[in-house]
Amino acid sequence: MRSSTITKGIAGLVALGVVAWGGTVTYLEHFDHAGAPQLPASSPTRQDPTAMAAFAALREVRCDYCHTQNANLPFYFSLPLANQIMKRDLVQGQRHFEYAPVLAALQQGKPPSVEQLSRIEEVITQNRMPPAAYLLMHPHAHLNEKQRVDILNWVREQRERYYATRGVAAQFRGEPIQPIPENVGVDWKKAELGRALFFDKGLSGDGTLNCASCHGLDKGGVDNLTTATGIGGQKGPINVPSVYNSVFSMSQFWNGRAKDLAEQAAGPVMNPIEMGSHDWATVAEHVRSTPGYAGQFEAAFGSDQIDKDTITGAIAEYEKTLITPDSRFDLYLKGDAKAITAQEKRGYERFKEIGCSGCHSGIAVGGDAYEILGLEGPYFENRHTKLTAADEGRLSVTHTEGDRARFKVPNLRNVELTGPWLHDGSATTLEQVVREMARYETPDRDIADQDVTDIVAFLKTLTGKYEGIPLKDVPADQPLQAPAAAPASN
């Protein structure tokens, strides 16, 4: 009798708990829907069925709770024990992905960035969002198959509409990686002047270094050293990024401190441990007194103004020409199915499935976003090295703690030629790079040896050509070949 009473009591408590849970879930569903992001009545997205279907799915999930700042959160976020757990989830959510720019793009009827689309595709394909703990209290936020397809269709449609490269095969227009275009808009008179300046050692403080000292055209656009060697043999703190295809990057330098190529060109010239010049007036005087420059500046800029702006502007224009189309992978994307092997195709598929393409996407296979090094694992803790200022990443620019160890995603074009790799130059083989990035940047942690081999094989298909010459064979002083002038119209 007593046992029966206890059983009934437990059953009653369970039933009471279920009722309480059901009531809470019902309340939260109403709260979620009432406070969900809205589209303005004038938003062009309202006229786009594909985008509207994706927005509806994302809105149902309430990505904004954990992936934006200052969202109006459900009541349980303020409860004592839950608050500690939820605060951690909020920090991690915003550390992993900022949803606000995506929401703003949808509201304005504009495309999210290449990388934002790739990150969304990654987590939806891997079915990683929303997490199980969240779904316990928000079961309506579970994405069904149709909702997942709606989001993925929108990602592909956005790529096809806004980011597909001219000449890409129809079946690859929605891929996360696109071919490098055959050319970009260039002022060739400025570019010819910029090439001369790029190789001019007189821009350095002691006349021994030029831009090509660290960015060798015959070395994949780098110096193949762990960190740069500057004036007087001084060692810089960070690995040299490639100058090839840098025109496709959202900003310059690992920490993104330069907004464009001209601003980047100005940095090393005055850096005391790089090219070591003292002031731009001295540099400009050297250029002004060098025979031939005056006429080139006049032809390029329409005046004899020689200063920091015109010097760096010309160098930047030359660097725009340093693109490397026609890699084997680009030929594959343009429709040549035999351009890459079966193993290389497997490597590309694993590159996407593991999540590498969530960051490394677009024309340059990177360069389109800032991401934290050690996103999914303790990268720095496992290095057993003393942290340096170079390890701070974007923190040194923004002074925002959330940007600590956040770096611009490196461009993977021609990556087989640009080692050693990573911002600290600590990776000496591509196999090491693949293993460490899978371990510290993706949920996969320790990937199979075959995956490593296949992904490395794929990465080697990204080596392109400069001026029609395979990059491995480009000489250090490769001349600039401006295209023939278009015939005059009648």
Image (tube, helix red, strand yellow):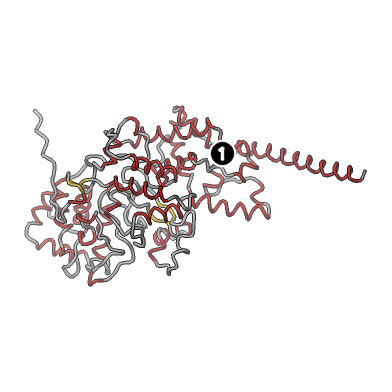
Furthest residue toward bottom: 232
Answer above or below: position of 62 versus 318: above
Residue 460 place in picture, x, y as percent: 30, 48
For the residue pair 79 and 427, the one nearer the viewer reads as 427
Residue 392 makes an appearance in the image? yes
Furthest residue toward left: 291
Secondary structure, mark 1, is helix
Residue 229 place in picture, x, y as percent: 26, 67
* Identity of the residue drawn at 49% across and 39% down: 124
* Identity of the residue drawn at 36% across and 54% down: 431
The quarter of the image holding the N terminus is: top right
Residue at which label 1 appears: 61
For the residue pair 20 and 191, the one nearer the viewer reads as 20
Residue 86 place in picture, x, y as percent: 61, 51
Viewed as shown, does residue 3 lie left or right of 43? right
Label 1 CA crowd tier, 10 Å (few <14, some 14–19, many 20+): many
Residue 488 place in picture, x, y as percent: 9, 33
Furthest residue toward right: 1
For the residue pair 442 and 391, the one nearer the viewer reads as 442
For the residue pair 146 and 292, the one nearer the viewer reads as 146
